[in-house]
Image: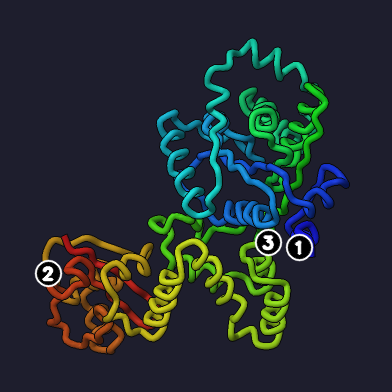
Amino acid sequence: MGIYEELVWRGLIKDVSSPELKDKLNNGGLTFYIGTDPTGDSLHIGHFSSFLISKRLKDAGHHPILLVGGGTGLIGDPKPTAERPMITYEQVEHNFNCLKKQAEDIFGFEVVNNYDWYKDMNFIDFLRDYGKYFNVSYMLNKDIIKRRLDEGITYAEFSYMILQAMDFYVLHKERGVDMQVAGQDQWGNITAGIELARKKDGSELLGFTMPLLTKSDGTKFGKSEGKAIWLDREKTSPYEMYQFFINSEDEKVIDYLKFLTFLSKEEIEALEESHKKEPHKREAHKALAKEVITFLHGEEAYEEAVAISQMLFSGQIKDLTYDQVKECFNGVPTVEVDEDLMILNALVKVGAASSNREARQFVKGGSVMVNGEKVTDEKFVVAKANAYGEKATVIRRGKKKYFVINHK
């Protein structure tokens, strides 16, 4: 397969700007860009699919440029339902620096900042050199704009399309960019850039979009219990990422393998067959977790995530390190204490029991474990000296309810 056929098989092509795109992709040699605004200080798993397509194109002989929009991030692209909150110049600069380093470390991409060509432009030049090429009726007809007209859209958001079109044109003139790649929700902005270049100097640019990575209900893929799955391991640990992928939807896991891994067609089809015959083994889910975590954080991080998962599944957590405790119990009910506690008081304090009487029943009934050891003595003391790293105590009530005490 050529790269175009591979992208089609993986389901990674939604809209194309020209029939010529197929041959140009298969022949290599294009300089293209993909962009993101620095609305946060880390990329998340939703970005990962987009940036992987850039690596696929790079491996096929094309040259990628990542644009992190330090300028457009100060405005914010229109959301389907409401205006994005403005963020400060300082926060945008901080986020840009974080994303630039992350993209360079993970993907090795060249990173540019569109603030470089916006910061010295005055409003008159903006209108004369770019605004005059945009027909308001044309802009109103774009899907994202039409969806916002009833709720209302500000002039700043309305102008975002012009800014992204400018990015395409400036990168074409200054960096030889021939093509833009983006998610399907950016199709209107891509075509606006193609039209701008054609009107300004007759340049013929290319673009294509990829489908958004979604769950089976159509919502965006990449969140667990309302929290984004970040590529920064300090925000989402390898263990949390492992659990996210292992528990991803059965009906979507093969799509995720196509989108998020470099496994071959033959390897993915073999996993699909295994998934159909023996879904309980979760071989496809395990392969997905292994490929993504190893790519982002290395094989050692993946193996540690598996080891932590196995210890938790078996209930044998006494050999965890303090750092591992922080990883795998992030988000469970947690309290801070500055003194040692009797077990009954500890259970009430963390919310594992509603009263000392109920706590005593749990202890006497053998349903309480502290740091992986069963506790049946109501006089047992939860002590800092016995905590993981003398910092954290893990209490389990029943089979699955965990609580953490942080010792000051």
At x 67% / y 79%, what residue is drawn?
A: 271
Question: Quadrant of the rendered structure where residue 52 is?
Answer: bottom right
| Cα distance in 3D space between marks 1 and 2 | 60 Å
Q: Position of residue 118 (x, y in %)?
A: 57, 23
Question: Residue flagged by tag 3: what amino acid is it?
Answer: Asp
* Residue pointed to by mark 3: 217
Q: Secondary structure at mark 3?
A: loop
* In the depicted structure, whether residue 329 falls above or below residue 377: above
106 sits to left or right of 213: left
Question: Residue flagged by tag 2: what amino acid is it?
Answer: Asp
| Cα distance in 3D space between marks 1 and 3 | 26 Å
Circle nearer the N terminus (1, 3): 1
| Cα distance in 3D space between marks 3 and 2 | 47 Å
Q: Position of residue 384 (x, y in %)?
A: 14, 70
Front residue (pair 196, 21): 21
Q: Position of residue 309 (x, y in %)?
A: 42, 77
Q: Is residue 150 visible?
A: no
Question: Residue flagged by tag 1: what amino acid is it?
Answer: Glu
Residue 88's label in the rendered image is: none
Residue 6's label in the rendered image is: 1
Front residue (pair 141, 352): 141
Tell me the quarter of the image containing the C terminus.
bottom left
* Residue pointed to by mark 2: 340
